[in-house]
Amino acid sequence: MSFAFSRRKPSRSASTIVADKAGGYHDLKIAGYSRIKGLPTGVPLRSIPFTISGHRWHIEFYPNGDDDESADFVSLYLRLDEDVTREVMAQYQFAFMAEHRAPFFRKRMEKVNSIPAWTAVGICGSHSGFGFSKFVKRSFLEVSTGAIKNDSLMILCDIVVFNDLRPVEATAAEAAAPATFVPPPDLHRHLADLLQTGKGADVVAELFGTMRESADSNTGGVVRVDDMEAQVFKALLCFLYTDSLPETTKKDEDVMYQHLLVAADRYDVERLKLICEDKLGKYIDVRTVATILTLAEQHNCHWLKKACLDFLSTPANLKAVLTSGGFQHLSRSCPSLKTALIAMLAT
């Protein structure tokens, strides 16, 4: 018995699910956050109703969680504010926004990088909704993110409503096209190569007005960066290009993060500043706390300042610091902190 195999290509077909969608967003500003953060668990603040894609919605913000299990968190929900004859499918995203002072004193609103912008897809019926019971820990939101400015908090809700899902037959060209592997993005690697080699650099810094570095001045058109060590500025550039930091020796790590915190604050690199705060928090001891506390006070690092003061709340630690050389530095740089520490010792 013999078998004959056909060499004809196997038949192939394909189809596509098409989603008709429409979207929009709503900004919810919590003004006077300090006055509402004491609301009991389970009690929400509600936005006014707003309309997106033909449906009416509202946002619910629970400053102390929506139930006992989430009492230490902020809860956020998107609710359908109407009666519907069929369920509504929507993609939604919540993000906290922060106002930053940009170069040349312009202001801008940006997503708070230290808090993820959570995205999900849900289906809801009349007067129901979806969201996140444990969106972010309240203590982290208040102390470490910079999201609360002038006692106000801005929340962005981005919504895309899927009105209809229907299958469509693919074209002959689409059906015949082989599957293609798309590698993950590696822009950070290319930018790192650009930074390290200096070849083909495509960014030129130009300052205007009275700050402009004239090409015919003694600087030869070079922008000088004073009061910063070269390796610190190099680490700053590495972070700006690659969102990562170069390796440092364990011995010098705490000093490097102190310098980088100053640089991050100087150039308004909020994510790097938060990273430095977190790293320096692990180096707080009797030897370093006075220097770190001075930095935290001078550069508005609220979480780091609190961590230092918590360390100094132990009488033995406080006494050791008050008799150290670091305390003399703190006294000269931040007299108000000196007074506060002496008052702590008295109590």
Image (spheres, helix red, strand yellow):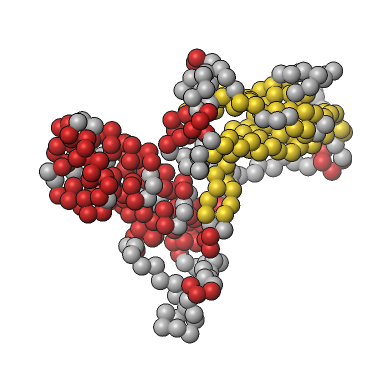
Q: Residue at x 59, y 33 (%)?
A: 118
Q: Identify which residue is drawn at 57% across, 58% down.
A: 106
Q: Residue furthest bottom?
A: 216
Seen in the image, is 23 located left or right of residue 285?
right
Question: Can you say which quadrant of the picture contains the C terminus?
Answer: top left
On the image, the x and y values in percent for residue 192 come to 48, 56
Residue 6 falls left or right of residue 76: right
**Which residue does the image show at 39% across and 67% down from the upper left?**
225
Residue 182: x percent and y percent?
A: 65, 44
- Looking at the image, the residue that sits furthest to the left is 323
Where residue 128 appears, as percent x and y from the top left, is 71, 18
**Front-most of 286 and 22?**
286
Using the rendered image of the protein, determine whether residue 337 is visible from the camera's viewpoint: yes
At horizontal 26% and vertical 45% (from top left) the residue drawn is: 337
Quarter of the picture containing the N terminus is top right
Among the 4 quarters of the image, the one containing residue 155: top right
Q: Is residue 28 above or below residue 192?
A: above
Asked if residue 13 can be seen in this view, the reply is no
Q: Nearer the viewer, residue 312 or 334?
A: 334
Above or below residue 289? Residue 123 is above
Q: Is residue 286 above or below residue 264?
A: above
Spot occupied by residue 135 in the image (x, y as percentages of width and height): 54, 28
